[in-house]
Amino acid sequence: MKLKNILLAFILTSSLGVTSCDDLLDVEPQQSIDARDAINTPEDLQGAVIGMYSILGEPELYGTNLLLLPELQGSEENLTWLGTFAGYRQVSLKNMTADNSEAQRTWITAYEGINLANIVLSKLDIMEDPDERDRVEGEALFVRGILHFELVRMYAKAWNDGDPTNANENPGIPIRLTPTTTEAEAAQLPTRGSVADVYAQVLEDLQAAKELLPERNDERANTYAASAFLSRVYLQQQNYAGARDEANRVIEEGGFELNPSVTSIFRNDNTAEAIFEIQQNDQNNAGSANDGLATFYADLEGIGRADISVNTEFSDENPNRYTTYDLYEEDDARLNQLFYEGFNFGAITTGKWTSPGQNIPVVRLAEMYLTRAEANFRLGTTVGATPLEDINTIRIRAGLNPLLIVTLDRILLERRLELAFEGFRIHDLKRTETDLIGRDPENGAEEYVIPWNAAELIYPIPRREIDASKGSLKQNEGY
């Protein structure tokens, strides 16, 4: 994950596998090396695997956007974008255009990662050790699966959007299962698979990865990381039994533990709570190119741009509506230790993202407890623990008294408080079919409701991809 330039030996062009227009690809075969021909030894293949993880940590993906964009898109009652980048502002205000810069670069980089995963899968015969082959195959399927999942959540209608008899036939995203390494392969025009088809492929990849990956894999994906993502996918589908069982497997079998403090996961690398993290350091991180979660969120001396402020009141016109910040109890360690008053501008901001070199926890154990609690409650089951026990596990770690009873609303509230600013907001609103409250950005007054399935909450297929596809890719509604 730390080797940002490793891909140069394996990717033909930065756009390869993302677009199919000759003008955009500008492929020069006589001056390039076929990516598959560049991988001839097990060591070469291991380098390509490192390259896959490197892509995951890029600012367009888990290095920034896959955690920041869901928060900006569901920013009502949570945060305000104050920065100068127009692409992020459009996301926050729900007025994206078809050439939105963040929609474009996230799409492109995600398909670069998918393409490299497919290249790795096409070269597995190089691996002589069967255990190593299984591990590499599992890692490639893991990367391919999670990136298709992130893309379908962003660029297509929600799983639960529409008539249950045909909702899943809504247009999804292109499903890429073979590598693109030559001009001829790049010339194949992409089409959008259905939402159902994309989710089916995601589940197939992650289920296979779960079986192939080892229980321990240093700082890379292991079988429990695959289960954790399976739990997340099932929850997005409202498949509560699947979400419960995969979360329970991680909790009961994975050997993970909640950190003793609410800050540890954001201050220390590879703690007992971390199921899968993006590995960063002070020299090599997503913020090195003026991106990064700390760059946008932090307001510390010498760190951060303070582009985002945490909302501490909704509006004077509606004092009964609370921001996330206002919903924490007075003694909650998450309130007292994970928020601070900015150094330069004095606004309240989150203390989760304070250092450009900190690791980025993509999946952590607290999420699994919250998922198991919600799924058990909805199903009326007690697999692993009761919902009350799981919620109290989270509350006690935050320094709060345990509850005596628990409701679904309380579970969802604890999820909102625990996972704030970690990339869950819009996805949770969509799966729970919770509308957003829109506000006039100039006066802050309550103005309108944004339905959870509104067209403006779906990202545009990048205009360059539409133009390059010669009509084979259909744009989303409203763009």
Image (cartoon, rainbow, N blue to C red):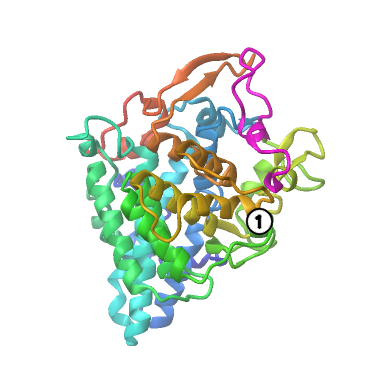
- Judged from this view, the residue extending furthest toward the bottom is 129
Q: Give the residue number, with chain letter if any, for mark 1.
A: 266
Residue 476 lies left or right of residue 214; in this view the side is left
Front-most of residues 445 and 305? 445
Q: Main secondary structure of the magenta part?
A: loop
- Is 336 situated left or right of 438 in this image? right
Question: In terms of secondary structure, where does tag 1 sit?
Answer: helix
Residue at the image point whose x is 74% and y is 48% from the top: 337
The residue lying at 40 percent from left, 40 percent from top is 154
Residue 55 in the figure: left or right of residue 154: right
Residue 394 lies, in percent from the top left, at 58, 52
In which quadrant of the rendered image does the C terminus lie? top left
- Using the image as rendered, state which of residue 329 and residue 472 is in the foreground: 329
Indicate yes or no whether the magenta region holds residue 356: no
> What amino acid is found at the position of numbered circle 1 in the picture?
Phe
Q: Quadrant of residue 319?
A: top right
Residue stretch in magenta: 309-334
Task: Indicate whether 170 appears above or below 273.
Answer: above
Residue 23's quadrant in the figure? top left
* Residue closer to the observer: 285 or 28: 285
